[in-house]
Image (tube, coloured by chain):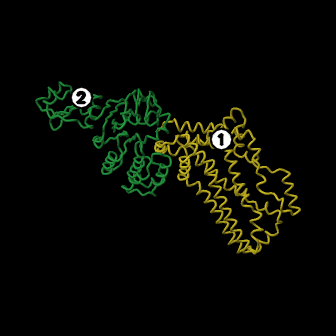
Chain colours: A green, B yellow
Amino acid sequence: MSVLIKAENVAKSYGSTRALLPSSFEIHEGRILGLIGPNGAGKTTALKAILGLTPFKGHLEVLGLNPYRQRAELMKQVCFIADVAILPRWIKVRQALDFVEDVHPRFHRERALEFLSRTEIGLDKKVKELSKGMVAQLHLALVMAIDARLLVLDEPTLGLDILYRKSFYESLLNDYFDQKRTIIITTHQVEEIENILTDLMFINHGMVVLNSSMDEVAERFKEVMVTADKVDAAKALGPIYQREVFGRQLMLFEGVAQEQLVGLGELRTPNVADLFVAKMKGRTA
Amino acid sequence: MKSFAALLKREIWEHPAFYVAPLVVATLILVSGIYNAFYVVSKYIGYERVVSVLNTIPEAARPVMYSWWPLLVIVFNLVLVTVIVFYLMDCLYADRKDRSILFWKSLPVSDSTTVLAKLTTALITVPAITFVVTIGASMVLMVMLTLIIWFGGGSAWDLLWKPLSLFDGALFIAYSFLVQSLWYVPLVGWALLASAWSRRSPFMWTFLPPIAVIILEQMLFRTERFAELLGERIVGVIPLAYQVNDEQFEAMRRSYESGNVENVARITDVIDPTPLLSSPQLWAGFLVGALFIAAAIWLRRYRDET
């Protein structure tokens, strides 16, 4: 599997604020990566560096290109939705389709029309006449109709109702994703995407605190519903996080062998949200 | 090429004022024309009297007497310049303000292409649209005059279409808009830079710096060089691009006196681009304009404010 994004000591400061501390990571082709972090953690900064929207320190290669120097070239193979859907308010839906078709060699109009046909969006409507959710739908329809090697979605479903969010992630997985494509998603609704992710990256205070595949996560992290008499024994193994649920201790362990945990209580793989809280609190505690 | 055309089209979609503004002015002219022609003339003057007055103008003098082209150029040029000034202030600013720049930047279009498309819009697209509307409006006016002449029993060909050459008029207007675009390259470049630079109020960034320079120069050196330079840049193209020489004037006078219709002056006689093309001011203007445009591209490309 080839390396799609290669970052070596990539860092970014805004004045005296250090948005991203020197970070090194690799993102491989054919993965769906969830980029998770609290507000202001540096997610958007990292994405902007990858998309060539901001200068940075260090070495960064995306599809073999320097994103900051070669943005236009990069955008032939990369698509993104930055933050909330922000399409120009004056443009008509039909004009948006025409425009993207003319400037993007990998855009498939019929695919965009197909996505739009599942919505209430009329082709002669202007963006300013659409609801916020419809604008997001339109933006997604435009982006999903582009054969990109890398798709970056920064909070793509903000403002959309749950029905559309579900069908969006389904079609992202079924119609769009294949082994040649890579998707990076950030969202606050982790639980909605965790079953489609293949990789997970946590960012906090400008640092990458976790970067591994979901398989490795399942391997490395275990959650144990500790039975009352085993609490002390469990604590001795050094849980990274613990909380009380209905009077029982729920402990999260990192890198502890399964055999050591089996006797302590009910064992399971933590969900991403719990893992996230554990990792974030663990840092600050 | 296809994407450059799409970028030009997109500017027209975003700014309907390109055609709405000249169309509104044309409509005003035509409505007042219709009112005068078919109400005032028919009620108070009479079509026959209009034709008889027209007939008193010697044939050789008609082409000059009728030449309304400079007048049309002045009126529509005012509209053109206003539309372009507002367009330029907006064009590298509006999408940063509403953050849709992130959508434009997500497409494989380089920032230099984007800025050059906006430059082309100001220098070519808008003047071309205004040109079409101007010619269209004057054709409608000529049809109206034709009707008046017919109602008065005159020959519209002899009294109107033959002396007033639509082709010459179109040539004259196209030339006027073209030389203006060439001459205004540095001003357009400056406005693009101000638009790319402003975080708020591109209007102030466009107009205040030149005014500040004029005031500072006045205070520090008690001179007005910059004001003179700016004034020359605003109106200086006229003496360079149009020539009325004494010989032509004399020839016109002679043919008028002799009634010789063959050698009568045409509006296109004043077209002479040689002094303009050989003036150092034009080329210095290109150079300064190119610097401003390069700076605008650089800002568009490398400034991160999202």
**Left-right relation of A170 to A19:** left
Q: Quadrant of residue A78?
A: top left
**Left-right relation of A217 to B223:** left
Q: Residue at x 67, y 53 (%)?
A: B77
Under mark 2, the amino acid is Glu
Is B283 located above or below residue B151 in the figure? Answer: above
Mark 2: which secondary structure?
strand
Q: Residue at x 72, y 34 (%)?
A: B222
Residue under numbered circle 1: B186
Mark toward the viewer: 1 or 2: 2
Numbered tag placed on residue A254 in the rendering: 2
Disc 1 crowd, CA 10 A, few/some/many (<14, 14-19, 20+): many
**Circle 2 marks a residue in which chain?**
A
Q: Nearer the viewer, residue A237 or A211?
A: A211
Q: Nearer the viewer, residue B283 or B46?
A: B283
Where residue A156 sits in the image (x, y, percent)? 37, 44
Q: Nearer the viewer, residue A115 or B49?
A: A115
